[in-house]
Every structure is written in structure tokens, then in C-alpha cells.
Image (cartoon, grey):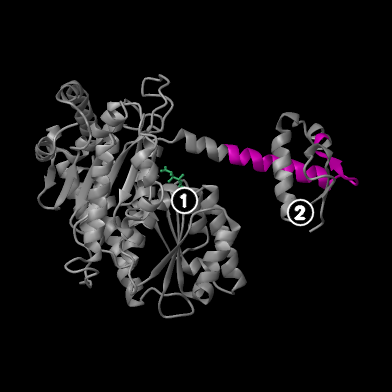
Amino acid sequence: MSSAVELWQRYQDWLYYHVDLGIYVDISRIGFTPDFITQIQPKFVKAFADMKALESGAIANPDEHRMVGHYWLRSPELAPTEELRRDITETIDRIEDFTQKVHAGDIHPPTADRFTDILSIGIGGSALGPQFVAQCFAKADVPLKISFLDNSDPDGIDLVLDLLGDRLSTTLVLVISKSGGTPEAANAMKEVEFAFKKAGLDFAKQAIAITGVGSALEKYAIGNNWLDQFPMYDWIGGRTSELSAVGLLPAALQGINIRDMLRGANLMDAATRNEDMRQNPAALLAMAWYFAGNGKGEKDMVVLPYKDRLLLFSRYLQQLVMESLGKEKDLDGNTVYQGIAVYGNKGSTDQHAYVQQLREGVPNFFATFIEVLQDSAKTHPEVEEGVVTGDYLLGFLQGTRSALYDNGRDSITVTIPVVSELTVGALIALYERAVSFYASLVNINAYHQPGVEAGKKAGAKVLALQKKLVDTLRSSTVSLSLQEIAVKIDALDEIESLYHIARHLHANCKILFEGDLSKPMTLKLMLIPQ
Ligand code: PA5
């Protein structure tokens, strides 16, 4: 264990500070040694070269044969063709123009002179960024209040629609899906379209699509004459799309300064192109992650923003890191089972929850503290002589960081001056590039998601089985056992799945079960006529 004086020196030796953004990155409480730095240097030579190639338009996502261009969104001049440069700048201009018209009431719903709400429909990369940013800048007097549908959960949909109530007539619906075919988004869209119809409203006049060129959603939006559409480019992945139309349109509509978000990301991008690892905050993060988990994700990343507004940063990073880095194969086809598990919520709240285990339990993680220097835009009363609530928050953060370190638990601290459009844009860019670097260090493709695609296919298989089960019961005059149904549809090896489907249909009054519910094989099933 180093002395306090040695730690203070290590802190100063490794502290990164971005002058224009006021952002600090401190990796001094990760226990790497000078030998480790020497060993990892050659890997960073490759990582910097990979990033250069990626930013100049190489096919950095070989499985999907795609360029990876999210860095161009905030530096369009770097995009490899004039057409792409024009596309990026025109889209941002169009977002601002559309927003200005919505705010001014020049674009309005058929039955009112202003939109009051946004309903954003999308999942994963098409939801988490907008949700995170909305929470960062939430306030009482937003020009349009945002709600989200990000699941195929009927009860969740009911709740959001109930809360909107009569304001559905003044709600602008954003349907966000790059592929335009993701079932959760498609289902939620159909539910909302149905709710509009039921309320006698014209959905098309209040609907906007943000989707890939040529997607089913684009065709649907054009075919039904929707209010407008914005592009989701082929070379942007869902989880890196916050600074494309996916994140910028909802942000601008909520009155968030999107030019500042882009500028923050642009400044961070410039800093993270520095090929001196010690002067590059994203390289420092990737290096620290690599050391902490031995380049194999052996330790989880616990993200603890000490700021309520940044609560969703933990979830946002969970997707960015785990969907990007969690891969079975490396780029050479070797089985590697890579990834870093990420979870978190916020401080100091979680000091009264799982931080107990962090301090004393299994040492299978490293923490990332996110510190915000400005307490609040308002002045606050003293809760004790000379002490405000923000002082306590800092005390809790510092105390936990020290307690973890003293008990052999490593941590990183990222400090921002204030939660602003500039710093939020910069944080997004910082972590996007740290993920890119780490992917190079461990030689994986961070830009595809075969596991997510596999999940989508598995879901479709269950629905196909449900259809067969229902058809079989429909054509039968007597009740049937699971075994009989499985034999009829040649799905004996899917019998457990058939049971789960039947149980769900039973709970929703579509199938009648006869027999003992605790003994699935004794059950007889019958369809309830609807
Ligand atoms: O990051 C990703 O690629 C995914 O999380 C996608 O964003 C998610 O699956 C939604 O896909 P889509 O935008 O095509 O509906």
C-alpha cells in the first residue's frame, strides 16, 4: 500500500485535464505499474492506427461490411466523401429548422396550434441515448415534454398512454429504428397508431420516422404520408447514434442546445486523437480497463455518477460497453469471450444499497466515479454551519473512493465542471472512443451485435410456435394435452417452450387449462373463443 504522499504524487503524475472542457480523468487509483505501461505501448500503436483508419472511412465493421462514422457527426469535414459531409450538415440544419417551426407553432397538430409532448418509440441504441440526455436536462418548463416507449410490454404502454391522456392529440410521435423492423419498436408503434385511431386522431399528421434508407419503416412512413422523416445512416450503430438525428431531434425539441453537444464531442474527439497515451483521456480509460480486467474483462465496471441528472449514464454505458465489447470471437475468428460487465446507478444513494458489497464483499470490480463540481445552478441553504448538501455529496464520493482503495478496490474518477450540453457531448465522445480503443487492444469488432440479432431470431421462433399451437387447438373439437399438441406439430423437442406459451395464453384468458396447474403434463388445453 502506497503512502498518502506517494498517492498524491501518483495522482498528479497521471491526472488528465482538458482545458477547454474543464474535464478531469484520474486513473491514479488503478494499480498499474511502469512495466505494464511499457508492455501495453505497442498495443496502443495499433489502436491509434486502427482509429485513424476507421476515421478515414475504412470498413471497420467487417462482419456487416460497414464504415463506422459516428465521429464524423461532430466533425463532418472528416467524412470521406463530399456527399456524406453534405448529408451530415444538411440533417443538422433540417433538425434545427423543423424544431424552430414546431416551437413557433408553424408545424402543429391538426386539432391544436402547438405540440405539447414528444412520444419517442425505439429500443436499445434507439432509446438509451435520448433517455440519458433527456434526464440530464430535465426541467419544469421544457418546450415539449418527452415520454418513451422502449419495450413490447402492454402494461408499460398503457401507463405511458394513460399519463399522456388527452395530450395525445398534441403529441409528436418519433418512431426511431435504424433497421425499421425491430419488433419492440414496431409493436409500440402499432399500439400508438391504434390509440390515435381510437381517439379519432390522424396518426400520420403527428408522426416522424428516424430510420435507415430503404427500411420497412421508411416505406411505411412515405406510404402513409407521415409528417416528416430524418435519416439514420448505415455507418452509424444504434449505441453510437446519440449525436445523429436519433438523439439530436428529440434533444432539440426539448430545448437542449444540440450545437453545444456536438461542440463538446468535437473537442473531446480532438483530445482523444492525441497519440501520446498519457495525454489522451480515452486511451487512459481503455488502458485502465485493460489493466483492471487483465484484458479479459475479469473485473466488472461499476459506474457511480454522484449526480441525479446523470443516473442514466450507468445504463447508457452499460449498453455502449457491453454490446460493443461482449463478443465471442475476435477479429481473427478465435473464441475469446470478451467483454466488460457494467452496472451502476448513482451515488450517494447506492451507498445505502450495493456499495456495502463493493466496500467489503467480493473484489470482482473496479469503480468509476463521475463527479460534478458545480452543486446546483441555485444557491442552497446551509444544513449545518458552513455546510450545504453538495458538500456532503462530495464528502460521500471522496470517502467511498478512499475506503474502496484502502480495501484493495481500484477506481477511476471522471470529473466534469457542470452538467451542460458541452460536457454531456464530451462524456459521450470520451466513452465512445475508449470503447473503440479497448476493442483494438483486445482485437474484436465493437460495431456489430450478433448476440442481439440472435435474440431477435429466437423471439420470432417462439411466436411461430405459438401460432402453430393456437392453430392446432382451433382445429380441434376436444381439449388436447401438451404432448398431443407437440406430436401433432412435430415439436416434441420444444414441449417446454409450448408449455410456457400456453401458460401465458392461459393467464391472458385465451386458453383454458383443465387439470393440476402444478403438473404441466397432466393439463388439457382448450382455446377460449374470443
Ligand atoms: O446498438 C445497437 O445496434 C442496438 O442496440 C440497436 O440500437 C437496437 O437493437 C435497436 O435497433 P433498431 O434501431 O434497428 O430498431
- Is there a contact, CB below 8 Å, between mark 2 and mark 1? no
Q: In which quarter of the image is the N terminus?
A: top left
412 is within the stretch colored magenta: no
Q: Which mark is residue 510?
A: 2
For badge 1, the amino acid type reads Ile
Q: In this view, does 395 lie above or below 458?
A: below
Q: State the image coordinates of residue 335 (x, y, percent, origin top left).
A: 43, 21
Q: In this view, does 255 lie above or below 268?
A: below
Residue 235 seen in render: no
Q: State the image coordinates of residue 518 (x, y, percent, origin top left).
A: 77, 43
- Please tell me which residue is depicted at 41% across the width and 74% down the height of the picture: 115
477 is within the stretch colored magenta: yes
Q: Quadrant of the C terminus?
A: bottom right
Q: Residue 198 carries which label?
A: none
Secondary structure predominantly adopted by residues drawn in magenta? helix
Q: Does the residue labelled 1 lie within 8 Å of ligand 1?
A: yes
Callout 2 secondary element: loop
Residue at the far right in the pictured view: 477
Of the pair 411 and 166, the residue shown nearer to us: 411
Q: What are the residue bounds of the magenta stretch? A: 458-483
| Left or right for 357, reference 369 | right
Q: State the image coordinates of residue 63 (x, y, percent, origin top left).
A: 41, 29
Residue 38: name its quadrant.
top left
Q: Mark 1 points at which residue?
A: 123
Give me the C-alpha separation between circle 2 and circle 1: 28 Å
- Please tell me which residue is depicted at 39% across the width and 57% down the height of the picture: 131
For disc 1, the neighbor class at 10 Å (few under 14, some 14 to 19, many from 20) is: many
Disc 2 or 1, which lies upstream in sequence? Answer: 1
| Left or right for 272, reference 68 | left
Residue 273: name its quadrant.
top left
For badge 2, the amino acid type reads Lys
Q: Does the residue labelled 2 lie within 8 Å of ligand 1?
A: no
